[in-house]
Image (cartoon, rainbow, N blue to C red):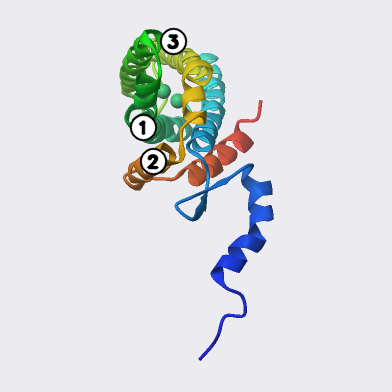
Amino acid sequence: MISLAVSPQEILRRSTPFLLRMAGPVRFVGGLLTQTPMQILEREHGVTRRMLTLLERLTAHVEIDAGFPAADVATVLSFFREFVELEHHAKEDLAIYPLALVHGDDRDAELVGRLVAEHDETKQLLHSLTLFWEPDDLLPEEREGFVELARTYVRRLERHMRLEERRLFPYARRMDAEETERVLASFESIDARGTLGLERWCAVAAELEARWAS
Ligand SMILES: [Fe+2]
Ligand SMILES: [Fe+2]
């Protein structure tokens, strides 16, 4: 019988400094090495900002009538629909916003109402934006509509994320061990129904950035 010279626990212990360098501060939850909910949300905002920058670059290209980059626009819109709208916003709606309602005051409750309404608003904007998508070039009036809507979507989502980071994420930073475990379990179940994970979307963003360097 083959015996393991090093136990899985030892491998985990030895690899921790490497993981710390790769992912920043981590903590143990339920005996497993994992990212905190806050780190997950911050990384998701990070890749969302990268994709918003790419959408801006694609929009500038469309605006000067240099052709409609249909495949790359489809990829970016898929990211916003499948990752931001269906995964990231679901995590905030189900796991993070309730924390502000439990621990916050009346102003926080109003803020949560506003943020939930903004999730609906950006979802509608994105839906309208996808209606402009064509496999070939756009007509002049379609181009104008696409550019206007894309810029509105970028502005609204950027403003929304800034507001969350300033007013809401502090609650995610202060959650206790029990809340952390519950929130991570919710995050996992939401991730399980998604198409690509965060790492894969980061790789997709890097490919697009290489093609659409400013
Ligand atoms: Fe949000
Ligand atoms: Fe967010």
Closer to us: 62 or 108: 108
**Residue 95, numbered label:** 1
Q: Position of residue 214 (x, y in %)?
A: 66, 25
Q: Earlier in the sequence, mark 3 or mark 1?
A: 1
* Amino acid type of the residue that numbered disc 2 sits on in the rendered structure: Phe
In this orientation, which residue lies closer to the viewer: 163 or 203? 163
Q: Residue at x 60, y 31 (%)?
A: 212
Q: Confirm or deny contact between disc 2 and disc 1 (CB under 8 A).
A: yes
C-alpha gap between disc 2 and disc 3: 33 Å
Tell me if residue 13 comes above or below residue 33 in the rendering: below
Q: Could you say which disc has been placed on residue 187 in the image? A: 2
Q: Is residue 110 above or below residue 90?
A: above
Q: Which amino acid, mark 1?
A: Ala
x, y (%) of residue 163? 49, 15
User: What residue is at 34 percent from the left and 25 percent from the top?
Assistant: 98
Q: Earlier in the sequence, mark 2 or mark 1?
A: 1
Mark 3 residue type: Glu
Distance (Cα) linking label 2 and label 1: 8 Å
Indicate yes or no: mark 1 CB to ligand 2 under 8 Å: no
